[in-house]
Amino acid sequence: MAHTDYIKLEFPSRSVNESFARATVACFAARLDPTLEELSDIKTAVSEAVTNCIVHAYPGVIGTIWIRAKIVDETTIEIMVKDNGVGIPDIKRAREPMYTTGGDDRSGMGFTIMESFMDKVRVRSAEGKGTTVFMSRKIIRKTSEI
Amino acid sequence: MKVYSQENNGVLRLSFVGELDHHDAKSSMKTIESLIDEYLPHDCIMDLSGLNFMDSSGIAVILRVNKRMNDMCGKAWVENPAGQPLRVLDASGIDRVIKVFTKAR
């Protein structure tokens, strides 16, 4: 049976933690020997998901954000970003490009960028209970191990 | 992120250096708005050559600068994005709203 590696992070929804979260997941993903481009794609998607938690899930309050990243079949990284915030009333609408409830400070491109940079993005949400974003990205190994 | 500015004959060049995410976006926008208020330029160039990371918060900053300049009957554009910031700009389709000049790929 293939060995599965994973990490779990839990941190408060302070914006200063955005760079910490994306750098930690990228550091974990580095063991798949990704290109710099693949690594920055993963960093970008994590940054978007974490920012959504901070801005939309916990508006005006500090809540908890959980991240679980897992390496599957030694080729794929699966990332889960979870909050216990306000939830998304209409997921389909929230995923539309340029749609935002965050005013001028937001571009409404967060989900579009996650979808562009990851192979799969799935969103589960319940109003008043929170949101979980599942993302995965397959990394094609370029070097063979000796 | 740090914002460096240079003004010459009504052209304000803003050089973005470092990482632009949601954490930096608000303070960066404040800095940029005060520079625009100070110089009242007719053209505003956002030079991204020193930017090594940007997410959709950066898109929001660029769109706000563009709107601010348009409101003043001025123009804004983006120059020299590369690497990850360029891919974010491409994915967002922002070039339908504001001109993006890249170095030859």
Image (cartoon, grey):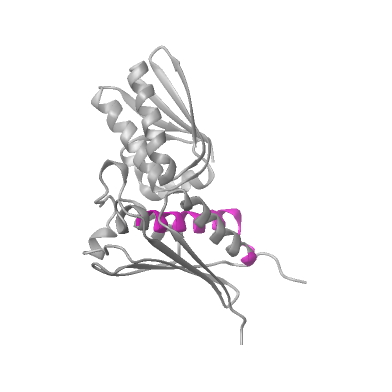
Q: Quadrant of residue A135?
A: bottom left
Question: Where A52 falls versus A127 (above or below)?
Answer: above
Q: Main secondary structure of the magenta part?
A: helix
Point out the image quarter for the C terminus of chain B.
top right
Looking at this view, name the residue that lies furthest to the top: B9
Is A59 in the magenta? no
Residue A39 screen position, x and y as percent: 56, 57
Looking at this view, name the residue that lies furthest to the bottom: A1
- Residue B41 visible? The answer is no
Q: Quadrant of residue A144?
A: bottom right
Q: Is residue B65 left or right of residue B3?
A: left
Residue A52 screen position, x and y as percent: 35, 56
Question: Where A142 falls versus B71 (above or below)?
Answer: below
Is A38 in the magenta? yes
Q: Is residue A61 left or right of residue B1?
A: left
Q: Residue at x 40, y 29 (%)?
A: B31
Q: Nearest the camera: A12 or A106? A: A12
Residue B38 screen position, x and y as percent: 36, 17
Looking at this view, name the residue that lies furthest to the right: A146
Q: Residue at x 34, y 35 (%)?
A: B98
Q: Nearest the camera: B97 or B35? A: B35
Callout count: 0
- Residue A110 visible? The answer is yes
Q: Residue at x 35, y 22 (%)?
A: B36
Question: Where B1 falls versus A119 (above or below)?
Answer: above
Question: Where A45 falls versus B13 (above or below)?
Answer: below
Write the start and end of the magenta stretch as one range. Answer: A31-52
Residue A2 screen position, x and y as percent: 61, 83
